[in-house]
Structure formats: C-alpha cells, structure tokens
Image: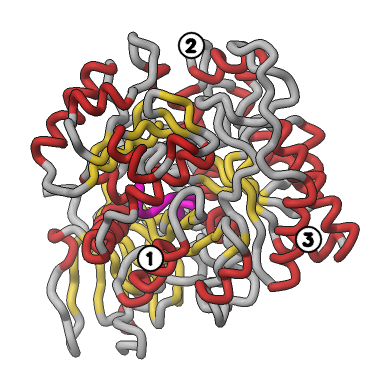
Amino acid sequence: MTSASGPVVLYRGGHVHSPARPGVTALLTAGGRIAWVGDDPALVVDQADIVVDLDGALVTPGFVDAHIHATGAGLALSGLDLAGTPTLSHALDVIAAAARDSPATTLLGTGWDETTWPEQRALTSADLEAAAPGRLVYLARVDGHMAVISGRLAAASGAVALPGWVGDGNVTDGAHHAARVHAYGTIGEAQRAAIWRRLRTAAAALGIVALHEMAGPEVSSADDLAGLLAHAAVEPGPRITAYWAGDPALLADLDPAGTYGVGVGGDLFVDGSLGSHTAALREPYADRPGHRPPPKLGVDGVAAIVLAAVRAGRQPGFHAIGDAAVDTVLAGLRAAADQVGRSRVAHSRPRVEHCEFVHPEQIAELAGHGAVAVVQPAFDACWGGPAGMYTARLGTARAAAMNPFAALAAAGVGLALSSDAPVTPLDPWGAIRAATGHHTPAARLTPAQALAAATRGGWHAARADIGRASTTGAGTLSPGSPATLALWHLPAGLDPAAKPPLPDLAGPDPVCLRTVLDGAVLHTRPDLSGRRVGQHRGNVSAGTGPR
C-alpha cells in the first residue's frame, strides 16, 4: 500500500507522546502524514509496507530549533570553537593549534567568554598575532555581539576607522560588521555548502526537523542567506525557515514568490547583549554605574518593520534582550496597530527573539499583540544563578528575574525554544533540561510545557498554521498531522509521573534512533535502517539502544 510520497510505515510497541491519546503505543504514517494513532496495531498492520518494532522506544514530535545562525553554527561544529576554554592562555593554545593545522585563508571561530577566565580580560590582536602570526583571524565572542580580530583583518576590512572599534582588536557595531563581512567573504561556495550540510546532518541526528535561520547584514549577508535557501531546496535535511534583518526591499530578490516565507527582521537588533554591556536597560548596569546604552533601533523603526511585514503578508521579528529594548518593541507594535489595526498586527505573530529581561506588564502586553517569545534556556544554564554573568551585570534581584519562561507561558505568550547556535550548541534535550531546571524555580516550565515549546512551539513561532496546509498540525502526533517525528532510546527510562510519556531527565539524554520530516527519513541509526521491503511486508527492529 505504498503511497505516492513513500511507504506506509507502522511503528509499534513503544511509547507515543500524544497528549490527545496518553498511553498509546503505536502509530501509522502514510503520504507524509500520520494516518492512525492507537494501542492495537493489529487493526492497521495489513496497511503497512514497513513495520518498525520500537522495543520500548519513545516517539515524540521532531524538535525545532527556532533561532540559529547557520554558517556560524556549522563552522563551530568543525572549526575553531573556544566555548568552554578554562583560561585565556588555554584559548590561545587552541588558536595556535588551529593556525598550525588549518590551511584556510582565514581562521574563523567563536565562543570565547572572558567572564569565565581567571584573567578576566578579552583577547586582543596582539594575542592573535602571537598565536597565529600574519593570519586573518576573526573570533566572535560567545554572544556574537563583539569579536576580536587580527591586525591583518583590521587593516583589510577598514574596521579601525569605523564606529565600534574598541581598540586592541576588539570590535562591535560597524567595525564588527565590516570585519565579519570581510572574513566570511573568504569562504568559498563549496566550503559553505559543506558547512551547511554538516550542520543539517548534525541537527537531524539530534532529532531536529526544522531550523529557523536568523540572517541579516550584521550577522551574515543576503548572499549567504540566498545560498542557504538554495542549498536547502535541493539537499535533504531539516527544513529551513528564514528571517532577514536587512532592507525589506531585498526580500523581493531573496524570496520573490514567497516560496520560503522569509520573515522581516527576525534578529533585527533593538539592542545588543548583556555580556557585551550593549543590552538596553531601564536602569544602569550594576558593574558599570551610569552605563545605560540606548536601543539601537527606535520606535519608528520597529513600527516600520511591522507595517512592512503586515502589508507583505510576512512575519516581523526583533532581537530584544533588555527591558528598555522590549519597551521599544512594544511601543512600535502599538504604533503599527494604530495604523493597520491590532488584529492585523496580532495575525502577523510578531516574534521577540531572546525576550530575556521582561516585566509582568510587558508580558501581558506581548500576549495582547499575539507575540511569540523565542527563548534560549541554555542562557540561564550558562549565565544565570548567584555567581553567573547576569548577576554581575544586573545585581541579584534583576538577575533572578531574567528569562521568566513560566510567566510568559502562563500569560499566553507563544513560547519557542532555541539555541542561538553557535552561541550555545544545538542541544534540544539540554534546552528542555535547562527550561525545567531554571535557576529561579518560579520561572521553570514543566517537562510537558518544555517539550511542547521545543516542538509545537517552533512551528507556531514560524506561523506554520497560516496559509500552509502541509504544516497544519505540525508538532503534534495525531491523525492528520504531518509525519514529523523522532524515535528515542531511553538510557534512563521514562519519567514515571509523566502522562503522556516523557524521558527521565535526571539521567543521560535520550539517544536519537530516527528523525522523520513529512514522512521522509532524515536520520536513522544503522541498526534501525533494516532492509528495503519493496513489494513485500517486512519488520525492522528499533532495538534496545545503541549497538
């Protein structure tokens, strides 16, 4: 009974995470959609071309990472990643080793964080010259809002003469943009394709079925985005949903027919980051008295982006970390609503990327605008808590109020989880663990809420339910929904209290056995792949775990 889009597959003998049908053990997929969910597979086994015996594996909706930077994230998988280096001197050793081993024209890297080093200072161009003499070097700070560059790259890009040249090779704003454009411009087309292929392959192996690319002139380029979209159109892998933070007029070239649904803005910077002291706050930084940088984009600019998105039938989005930046976004939404109506703004489903320091009254207004908060639980895991960077920058009280996931969810603000890779790695179960283990107990999500935000929440954040019949119901395992799912071996077993079933997050992470997008297998372990059954029925076992 093979359908036009592939074989009919019966998955049986496992634990299916279906809130509408708790306790079911099997599902049938056909034509790229879920055809049946239940606990008596004998009812449908005769319809199946392939039977997968789950042997107790868990079936969940596939994950969505709702905020990444594809080229940087792909580079971090095999390039120069300084995340986790314990000292500045160790980071320099890693840079020196990369310089010796890499024949590439430019050393590209990310992840350094001086707040975790005992030296408590940033890298400098002199450091880079000592570690990689004469090379073009671009190393983004962990937050992506600051970088250190070598003297050769500073000269080649003209960064020294631009706003944002901090000195000693450290760059922000325009100087950072110029250095990044020049450095990334040395990556050839074949190398970019390999970078994206590596990223999408790694994502699929983690149960990720969709990635939201946050592109823009300050983080990548229009050519980079166009290349990624073209690559994703012809090569299998997680679906790419893209957002462009540059001139909206370029969308006519990037997505002329609306094929990709490219959003307007996305990671459009209303402010910067706390680590770089560039997030916009109502009150000054605790560790820099009197320092209170203004928003990078004003109310009129926010309103203009919202109006452009609404009139084009696209989705607007904004990067806002500090409370003053969220104030600006809200004022811009109000101004746009005054012109086109509140309902049209809400229908556009505006996104607030990060949405970290947000007060109760702001949360309530975000809900009223139909907004989505795209959050990164790993940020709290990395920088929250009494000894974390948030406390250093904001003081104890404000730091404890950061990333109020539970309050956002309770108010009806759409919630989607993400990594902001390469800022933090692709790690969906790690995000769920961080969301349920927030340093502030009142901010924690339940495991079921966190899984929903990491799956269905990502499709909601991309407006998958608006005008795209193929993705209606995405993120749920119920009849008629897309056959978009992941199978998991559970080293720690199930959480005995969870209904529908969830992993026991106190133990090791689940291991992905298979990832499926609209019925197409993106990733499968060799011990699950089985044989092609063709015109006769066949069984494939999921096994009891990695072999």
Label 1, label 3: how far apart the Cα atoms are: 29 Å
Residue 228 is labelled as 1
Q: Earlier in the sequence, mark 3 or mark 2?
A: 3
Residue 99 in the image: state x and y as whole percent.
Answer: 15, 36
Q: Is residue 161 above or below residue 382?
A: below
The reply to whether discs 1 and 3 touch (Cβ–Cβ < 8 Å) is: no
Q: Quadrant of residue 507?
A: top left
Residue 265 in sight from this viewpoint: yes
Q: Which residues are magenta?
A: 64-73
Q: Would residue 343 be counted in the magenta stretch?
A: no
The reply to whether discs 1 and 2 touch (Cβ–Cβ < 8 Å) is: no
Residue 19 is labelled as none
* Residue at 42 percent of width and 17 percent of height: 115
**Residue type, label 3:** Val
Tell me if 420 is positioned left or right of 266 in this view. Answer: left
The residue carrying mark 3 is: 345
The residue carrying mark 2 is: 387
